[in-house]
Image: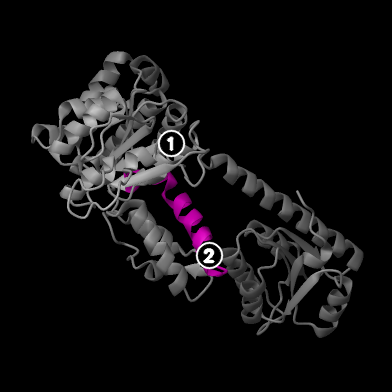
Amino acid sequence: MDVMSEASRKLLIVEDDPGLLSQLKWCFEGYDVYTAEDRESAIVELRRHEPMVVLQDLGLPPKPEGVEEGFLTLAQTLKLAPHTKVIVVTGNGDQENALTAVAQGAYDFYEKPVDTDTLKLLVDRAFNISELETENRRLQSAVHESPLDGIVAASEGMLAVCRMIEKVAPTNVTALLLGESGTGKELLARALHRLSSRADKDFVAINCAAIPENLLESELFGHEKGSFTGAHKQTLGKIEIASGGTLFLDEIGDMPLPLQAKMLRFLQERVIERVGGREEIPVDVRVVCATNQNPEDLIKEGAFREDLYYRVSEITINIPPFRDREEGRLILARTLLQKYSKAQGRAINGFSDDAVKAIESYSWPGNVRELENKIKGAVIMADGKMVTAADLGIAAGEGEEESLNLREVRSQAESKAIRVALTKCYGNISKTAELLGVTRPTLYDLLNKYGLSAEGYSKKNVSAS
């Protein structure tokens, strides 16, 4: 860890006695010192400069002989900047209030009359500990981040998805990503490419739902000159362009049936024919597909070929919707806030209490994409250092009210524990039962009770609900 120089250490001194304030400023002249004489100016300086350490007198105006204003200042400081080290200065013999201040969150206390050498030692130690804690939080954050670049995985479901991505990426199997719109399917597809041996080659993406049916075949397979009106030159398709790399077929559930037959042949033979051409062209490409629809429903409706489904789903990875990522919801929100605050050049410290409640209670129908958009807007709209629920455009109470019925709460907790255990054990019944502390027959009864299936959590088909 790089140790800060004293000149870069920000210290806020809150003191209404001009003589003592002058003495303290002289004592800490090697630091970056800011001063305030009352609670209002102290909070202004705290917001403006974000000092690591605050040296605060408990007796502040309008009643400097009392401690009420000092305690209010302490509480407000710690609420706005909970990691700040506050050293309170009390009157001689006033240990009761000093201990109360420490109990309420102050880092340390010092009694008047002031001995500058001792006080300097206390302040210096507070800075050192603050820097160590900051580095520790950074390292902890790095540990909890996904091993995949750009992906934050803190919930059990997303951690299971990332484990699957890491295992599947080095292989050439065709992977199918299933998840609602906005859950990050393309981001995970890019992770599969980035962690593979093809990372130095092209990642080529095509959205099967965004291209008209009569153009999609040409986009995928390419065409020869003169093969149709407007085909003025030979053009390579996305499959051929991706040769050596990875081809990402997004929304493959919307691929027209006639084209599905041609795609099936390509996946089986690994050769293509351009539109209007007769030559078979071998292509070495890794294929990753995605859809927000249920493939089995599409097959029943006759909209998707069953043989193609089995060909594209050699490995199936289910991506949990954002509403089911309770453990990681706020972590991802804070990560995105930090990212977009930096991009916009805004010094925003975090989310207000009502914003946190809103993030946790809102149903997020648009998943991570909706969260990202709301945070982008909130960073622009926020007036203060904290993003509020109003900045996000979500009411603090929006979403379903939390149930207080004990039977329902127990059922929800039990169901969640089973799903997490199944995820950890990849659907292995014996290991899951052991982890939960129940017998195999009891676990089977519980799976039946909650409509769960261990198969969906197997290593071949990770379910991250």
Which of the pair 204/28 is nearer the observer?
A: 204
Q: Is residue 49 above or below residue 406?
A: below
Q: Position of residue 328 (x, y in %)?
A: 43, 46
Q: Secondary structure at mark 1?
A: loop
Tell me: 69 left or right of 90. left
Q: Is residue 133 above or below residue 243?
A: below
Asked if the magenta segment contains residue 118, the reply would be: no
Q: Residue at the location (27% across, 29% down)? A: 266
Magenta span: chief secondary structure? helix
Label 1 amino acid?
Gly
Q: Secondary structure at mark 2?
A: helix
Disc 2: which residue = 343
The magenta-colored residue range is: 321-350
Q: Position of residue 225 (x, y in %)?
A: 26, 47
Which of the pair 76/150 is nearer the observer?
A: 150
Q: Quadrant of the C terminus?
A: top left
Query: Which numbered disc covers residue 245?
Result: 1
Which of the pair 156/377 is nearer the observer?
A: 377
Sort mark 2 into few (<14), some (14-19) or many (20+) by Cα contacts within 10 Å.
few
Q: Position of residue 230 (x, y in %)?
A: 21, 55
Q: Residue at the location (28% across, 32% down)? A: 272
The answer to whether marks 1 and 2 mark residues whose Cβ atoms lie closer than 8 Å is no
